[in-house]
Image (spheres, grey):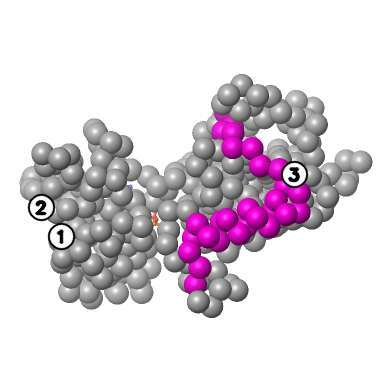
Amino acid sequence: MENVIIIGTGCAGWTAAIYTARANLNPLVLAGEQPGGQLTTTTEVENYPGFPEGVMGPELMMKMQEQATKFGARVDYKTVAEVEKSGDTFRVQTADGTDLEAKTVIIATGAAPRHLGLPGEKELIGHGLTSCATCDGAFYRDVPVAVIGGGDSACEEATFLTRFASKVYLIHRRDELRASKIMAERALANEKIEPVWDTTVTEYLTDDEGEVRAVKTENTKTGEEGELELKCVFVAIGHVPNTAFLGGLVDTDDAGYIQQKPGTASTNVEGLFAAGDVADHVYRQAITAAGDGGRAALEAERYLAEQE
Ligand code: NAP
């Protein structure tokens, strides 16, 4: 029986692993097939304290893993298929059929970028469709691109992309941005950004090589159809928390984010803790996820001490 199973290896998961390992709880970390979380798809991180010169996202994650394993955290690259609780024991089943038992579980599985759900969308990822301007923006120099969405992410991505692209269409389904005033104003003041209001994308059009070359659009008020020529679409319409594998075990909000008891990492299930973007759609920062991981670890430690 494990003391602690940590599911997920972004900032929250590794921080929970560092803390529980240093508390001699011998944690088992289940990393999944794509370990490292969202920071592995970014380049430079400039706002993580302790790195005045910035640090590359993947390097930061490697360092966190190194720190966790140095203190004895064990890592298994398995994907979790199901978590159940019976009495005081959690049963964690992995996709390859392995059954594990634990006294506590920390869920730190993060969130994944949301897509529009158009036909063929998944296949176009990496072929002119992406959710990460930081990762892919530099590939699209002096060509038109589009960002879909009207939130802070869309405005941030659009502004960033003006460093490279000749023009950035900001396609939003309404005529008012959801983004904070400062981000919205910055984006709209940028002469390379052309807002396309009241518009949804209905189809991605590709060239002979299967790369995106244009999008078909529809005006949400008039129904008028149109086409925008571009080389890449950056979808920035929010994220989906990775909670499907939990079934109905734990309380989530309508969007699927795990609900923590106010001011804690605890959930409605005793011994089950949540940390990072899987429970936070507001801050979504590396540092807040790390802090949340530390908090989940301390609470798991306290819970185990109380059980003894
Ligand atoms: P968000 O605030 O939920 O915005 C999502 C945007 O996508 C909205 O404008 C929404 O339109 C649009 N959208 C959603 N589903 C759509 C669909 N199916 N088709 C077309 N458009 C769709 O998400 P976010 O921008 O990723 O931000 C998430 C959180 O992180 C926010 O709290 C934000 O403040 C924060 N954040 C902060 C920063 C920063 O401060 N540096 C940067 C990025 C994100 P509607 O407006 O019509 O609903």
Residue 27, label in figure: 3
* Residue 9 makes an appearance in the image: yes
From this viewpoint, which residue is outermost toward the top? 97
23 displayed left or right of 233: right
Which residue is pictured at 15% across the width and 61% down the height?
A: 143
**Which mark is nearer the camera, 2 or 3?**
3
Q: Residue 120 lies in what quarter of the image? A: top left
Residue kind at label 3, given as amino acid type: Pro
* Left or right position of 158 against 72: left
Q: On the picture, is 308 further left or further right than 211?
A: right
270 or 109, which lies in front?
Answer: 109
**Residue 95 falls left or right of residue 304:** left
Q: Earlier in the sequence, mark 2 or mark 3?
A: 3
Which residue occupies 30% across, 43% down? 125
Q: Amino acid at mark 1?
A: Pro
Residue labelled with disc 2: 229
Vertical placement of 180 versus 274: above or below? below
Whether tag 2 and tag 1 are in contact, CB under 8 A, the answer is yes
Q: Which residues are magenta?
A: 54-81
User: Mark 2 belongs to which amino acid?
Assistant: Glu
Residue 93, compared with residue 144, is above or below; it is: above
